[in-house]
Amino acid sequence: MEPNAEKLKEKIEALENEIAAKDRELNTKVVQLLHANELLKSIVLRLEDLNNTAAHEKNQKIKILIADLINVTSDDLWEQFEITFVKVHPSFYTGLFRKHPNLTANERKLCAFIRMNFSTKDISNITRQTIRSIEMARFRLRKKMELPRSMNLSKYLQNF
């Protein structure tokens, strides 16, 4: 094959891969919009239901509604973060899974945050967990990965 033809073929493949990635991203955004619309409809119905609820029950229902909203928004933010993270660090999860196949979803999420050099406080704010629980999760992660105390977890995850 001619060198120019080979370069052209590589460019075409790269463009096709880019289009496929953009298509997946667009599909994800559409699904997120549909999900958001369903959520908004559900909230409207639940708020309308609150009008017909006795005063002593309203506070409890409002607390449940707020908790549901917090959970949904943090899930959406994580999905968007993960899509972008995979684009920026395409081999991270592959290498991590190869070396540590027994990690849970939360441990993989923690690894991604640590890989991005987020502080324990930042991770705590993002995940809405206490700093102490993040510290414990980091400790358990290090133990599960069988890393010595002398090894920096962040630097270790940079290698993936």
Image: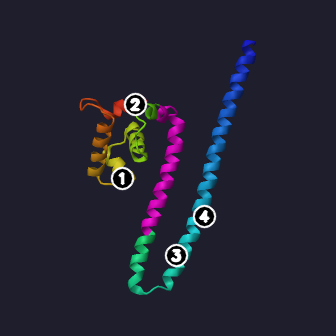
Q: Which residue is mark 1?
A: 125
Q: Which residue is mark 2?
A: 158
Task: Determine whether 43 is above or below 103 in the image.
Answer: below
Between the residue at mark 2 and the residue at mark 1, the CA separation in whole angstroms equals 22 Å
Between the residue at mark 2 and the residue at mark 4, the CA separation in whole angstroms equals 38 Å
Q: Earlier in the sequence, mark 2 or mark 4?
A: 4
The disc labelled 4 sits on which kind of residue?
Asn
* Residue at screen point 40% across, 36% down: 115
- Labelled pair 2, 1 in contact (Cβ < 8 Å): no
Between the residue at mark 3 and the residue at mark 4, the CA separation in whole angstroms equals 14 Å
Secondary structure under the numbered disc 2 in the rendered image:
helix
Between the residue at mark 4 and the residue at mark 1, the CA separation in whole angstroms equals 26 Å
The disc labelled 2 sits on which kind of residue?
Gln
Q: Earlier in the sequence, mark 3 or mark 4?
A: 4
* Residue at screen point 32% across, 38% down: 144
Between the residue at mark 3 and the residue at mark 1, the CA separation in whole angstroms equals 28 Å
Task: Determine whether 128 is above or below 115 in the image.
Answer: below
- Residue 98 at x, y percent in the picture: 45, 31
User: Which residues are drawn in magenta?
Assistant: 66-94
- As drawn, which residue projects farthest toward the top? 2
Task: Determine whether 111 is above or below 63 in the image.
Answer: above
- Labelled pair 3, 1 in contact (Cβ < 8 Å): no
Q: Which mark is residue 46?
A: 3
Q: Earlier in the sequence, mark 2 or mark 1?
A: 1
- Residue 63 at x, y percent in the picture: 40, 72
